[in-house]
Image (spheres, coloured by chain):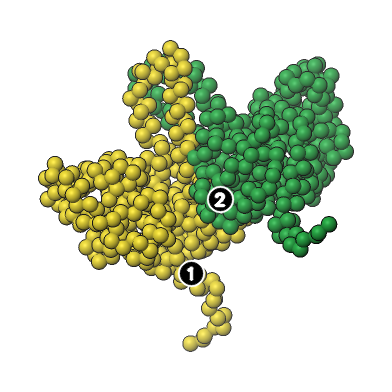
Chain colours: A yellow, B green
Amino acid sequence: MGGDHGPAVCVRGAMIAGQRLEGVRFLLHGDTALIEAELARMPTLRAISEVRHAERAIAMDEKPAQAMRRGKGTSLWNAVAALKEDEAKAVVSAGNTGALMAISKLQLRMAADLERPAIVASWPTARGISAVLDVGANVESDAEQLVEFAIMGAAFHRAVHGSTKPTVGLLNVGSEDQKGHDDVREAHALLRETTLDFDYRGFVEGNDIAKGTVDVVVTDGFTGNIVLKSAEGLARFFTNELKATLTSSLMAKLGALVAIGPLKAMRRRLDPGRVNGGPLLGLNGIVVKSHGSADANGFASAIKVAVDLARSDYSQEIARNVQRVMAAAARGSDPEPQTGVVG
Amino acid sequence: MGGDHGPAVCVRGAMIAGQRLEGVRFLLHGDTALIEAELARMPTLRAISEVRHAERAIAMDEKPAQAMRRGKGTSLWNAVAALKEDEAKAVVSAGNTGALMAISKLQLRMAADLERPAIVASWPTARGISAVLDVGANVESDAEQLVEFAIMGAAFHRAVHGSTKPTVGLLNVGSEDQKGHDDVREAHALLRETTLDFDYRGFVEGNDIAKGTVDVVVTDGFTGNIVLKSAEGLARFFTNELKATLTSSLMAKLGALVAIGPLKAMRRRLDPGRVNGGPLLGLNGIVVKSHGSADANGFASAIKVAVDLARSDYSQEIARNVQRVMAAAARGSDPEPQTGVVG
C-alpha cells in the first residue's frame, strides 16, 4: 500500500469511500504497523477492514519483469492473490503501473478469450464523461484488439458512468471509410457488421474527444497514451496561462478575485488527469489503478470505480460481446456453403 | 484562389503581407475578373502583383486522385507550375489540402531523396512556438521517415521561428530507450548516432508538447493528426467552459467584464489551430497550406511563413542533413571491413 504518499493517504481514501459506499469492506495489504497506526484514529473504517501484513513493497520505478520475478510476498502481489482466491472483489492500487499490470495478468489471466488488457481513462467532455482506451497498456494494437477495446470500453462506460446503450467511436484521421491505416479500417468493418450491446458510430476525430461526440473512444495504446498526456499537459498550460493572465494587470487581478470560485471549480472539472481510477480492463478480475500522486479524495474515487465495476454486469457483458464478435469473424472468414438444401 | 471565403480574403491577406514584408511580389492565380475587382481598391498591392487567369478551381471536397487527373488549368495547378518554372519562390493556398499535396508532389517531386512529405504545425507552448510534424500527410511512418521528419522540422524551425540550433524530440509513450514500438526505437537509435545540425534530445511524452520541452516534436502522421485535432478540440472546450464559468453568476460576470481584454488575448494566443500556415515539407519547392477558414490576417501569416522559408537556408539545410543520415545508415548496415591496412 502506498503510491507516492505512502499508506496514510490510501487509508484515508478508504475511510472516505467506506462512508460513501454502503456495504463495502476492505482488505488492507501492507506494513501492519503503519496501517494500524492510521486505523487507530478511524474506528468506523477499522470495523469494516482487515489488515494483511506484507514484508515488502514494489518500488515505483521497478521494471515489470523484475517485479514479476521478485514480486511474491509484496503487498501488490498479495492484493491480487486475494482477488484471485475470491477473498476480494476488486483491487485498487496507487503503486507501480507496469508491475500492477504484469502481476495482475500473471495471476488472474485474461478474461473471455481476450488477447490483451487495456487501460481506460475517464475523460471530462462538453457532454459528460467519455471513456478513452487504450491509454497505455499496449504500444501496438491490431484490428481485433481494437474491437476488444470497443467491447471492454462500452461495458465499462455502462457499469461506471451509467449509460444504457453506450455510443462507441474509433479514433482516426478522418471520418470517411477509406481513411486511416489497415488496422483501423479492418476494426471499423468488423464493428459495423456485428450486432453488439452498444451503438457503434464509426470513425471519430481528435476534436470529437472533448466534444463528447461518443461515450467510448477507441484507439491503440500508443496514440491513446500520447493524446491523454498531451491533453493533461495542455490543461495545465491553460490553467497556468489563465493564472498569469489574471494577474497581469490590476484590472485583471480584480476580475480574477471576483470570479475566483467558479474559476477554481472549472479547473478541477476540466483536467483529463483529474478523474481518478483507471481500470485495467480485460482481466479475470477488477483491478483499478489510482494515480500515484492522488490525494485521499482521489483514492476514494478510484475505490468507487472499482466498487461500481464489481457490482455491475460488466464481466458478463464483455464475455457476451466477445462471443458475438468471434462468431461474426468466423462467419466472415468461413462463409456458409452456397449450395441450397431443398427439404 | 479561394478557400472557404473566396478570393477576396486571399487578396486582402496579400495586401497585408505586402505592407509587412519588404520586396515581396505576388502572382495571383484565379478568376481575373474577381481578383481585379479587389485589386482596383488596392493600388499598392496592384503595383507588386501580376494576375494569372484560371478557368477552373478545384473544389474543397474533391478527392486528391480526381484533382490530379483533372487538375490541369486550375488555379492551384497553375500556382504550383509557376513555382516549378521558377517564376515564383513559394506557393500559398487556402484550398483543398489533399489536392494541394497531390498536385505539388506530382509537379515538384520530393527533394534530396526524401521519401514522403510532412505537414508541420506551429504549436504555441509555455516557452514559445514548437514545430510538430507530421500532422496528417501520412497515416503510417517508418523509422527512416521519422528521421526525415526530424530533419525537415529542425530546418523549418530554424527558418521560420529563428532558433539557432533547434532541439528535437521524438514523441513516445515514455522516455526510456526501451519504450515504444520498433519504428520509434529505430528512429531514436539512428538520430542518436548521427551528427546533425540540430540537438536531438531523445524521447518526449505527450505532456512535453505544451511545455515546449523541445523546439521540434516528431511523430507519425496518424498520431500527430489526432494529437493536433484533440488539442484544438480541448482549446475550444476550455474557452467555452471559461465563457460559461464567467457568466455563471453575477460576481463571475463582473470579474469577466473587468478582465475581458487579457482573457481575449490569451484565447488568441493559445489555440494550436490559430498559428496559421502549415508548410508541406520535403518537396522541391515551398508550399504552404493556409486554413481554409482563415481570415485576411491569417492568410497574411501563411504568406509570411512562405516568405521566411523562401528567404532562408532551409532547402540546403535539409539536403545537407539527409546526406549525413544516409551516410550514417550506410555505415550502420554495411560496416567497414575490420582488416587493417598498414601503410
Please determine whether, in this image, residue A240 is positioned above or below residue B218.
above
Task: Name, please, the residue furthest toward the bottom.
Answer: A343
Viewer-proximal residue, A322 or A139?
Answer: A139
Q: Which residue is mark 1?
A: A328
Give left or right: position of B259 versus A187: left
Name which residue lies at 44% across and 62% down: A116
SS of the residue at dot 1?
Answer: helix
Label 2 crowd bin: few (<14), some (14–19), many (20+), radius 10 Å: many
Q: Is residue B323 above or below residue A251?
A: below
How far, Cα to Cα, is label 2 from label 1? 23 Å
Q: Position of residue A185 (x, y in %)?
A: 58, 58
Task: In the rendered view, tell whether residue B45 sits above or below residue A79.
Answer: above
Q: Which residue is mark 2?
A: A172
Q: Write the residue at 74% across / 62% down.
A: B338
Instruction: Report the residue at 54% width, 52% height from top.
Output: B177
Q: Secondary structure at mark 2?
A: loop
Q: Is residue B158 visible?
A: yes
Can residue A174 be seen?
A: no
**Which mark's residue is nearer the viewer, 2 or 1?**
2
